Amino acid sequence: MTRFLAKRIGQAIVVIFFVTVIVFLLLHSVPGGPAHGILGPKASPQAIAEFNREHGFDKSLFQQYWAYLSELFHGDLGESYTLNQSVASLIGQRIPKTLVLTGLSTLVALLVAIPLGVWQARRRKGLADYAVTTLVFVGYATPVFFLALILVIVFTQKTQLLPPQAPQTQSIAGLFADSRALILPVLAGAIATVAAFSRYMRSAVLDNLAEDYVRTARAKGASERRVVWLHIMRNSLTPIIAMLGYYLPVLFSGALVIESVFNYPGMGLLFWNAAQTSDYPILLGAVLVIALATVIGSLLADVLQALVDPRVRGAIR
């Protein structure tokens, strides 16, 4: 296990290094260079030269990249050109709220998707299985923004049961204090995720139902409930655990849309507003943070998978 951890952490460090290279090159791929992207296409040559001198863009690419890495090691992601605040502090204020939203959405999705996948697998090729599969595919194919708009129309305009806007607060406690306003953003994120998780769970349970250990447990007189929820469930959860890590970028991209629709004060809304104003330091900082979260999520998923499944531990020895 120690060797496996060392190998995966080494791979994660290499991936993070390449992520910093890609983010750095993204900044320089802006048409006309960073100065044109930030000052606008009508900026004078004198203004561009002054900007490049001030920010070190007149140096060689290697020198610029080394300076960029040094700033990253010190937690410096640059300054926002529109909000006059450091990008690190802006992301630090917003990312906990996005984690709350994605965490709650994922939790609700898992609580629905796992029993649903098991229930479908035990009724494979039945009328109920076909009906639920159809609904799941509709949910999977529906764009998140359209799903969020449907929820707004149904729950705020037609029935007026819930407020259309997410809690407008600066603190995490404020989010939970206005829990009614939190329901629709969480629901929009959960519905979009239930479809994917339930399909994986259904397939995993079907695979395990045909395994020898299941037939052995039944031959020993174990009840069907015990076979499913004790023996099959543990092995079937392995792909779901792995998927959680790999699904992290999808959850964050979904949060971007959901936060924009419900005006949720998280990192997705910060990214959306930065895209509207071409605030490149915020955009690149957000891309870097999401990429790092994806790498870390993938690492955690592999470790959890190895802890849960003895076959994975055996394969890595």
Image: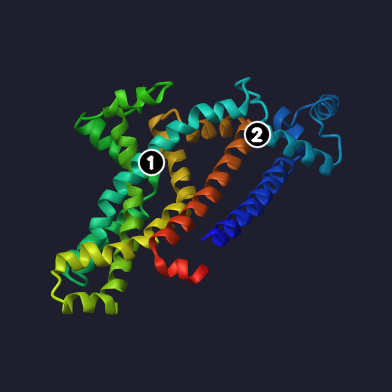
Q: Which residue is pictured at 27% across the width and 67% down the height?
A: 232
The disc, 2 or 1, on the residue closer to the chain's N-terminal end is 1
Q: In this view, does 136 lie above or below 288?
A: below
Question: Amino acid under label 1?
Answer: Gly
What residue is shown with label 2? 280
Q: In this view, does 216 lie above or below 166?
A: below
Q: Which residue is pictured at 43% across the width and 31% down the height?
A: 97
Across and down, in percent, residue 33 comes to 77, 38
Q: In which quarter of the image is residue 210?
A: bottom left
The answer to whether residue 220 of the structure is visible from this angle is: yes
Across and down, in percent, residue 215 comes to 22, 79
Q: In this view, does 86 lie above or below 15?
A: above
Q: Which residue is pictured at 42% across the width and 34% down the height?
A: 259
What residue is shown with label 1? 103
Camera-nearest residue between 222 and 78: 222
Question: Amino acid under label 2?
Answer: Tyr
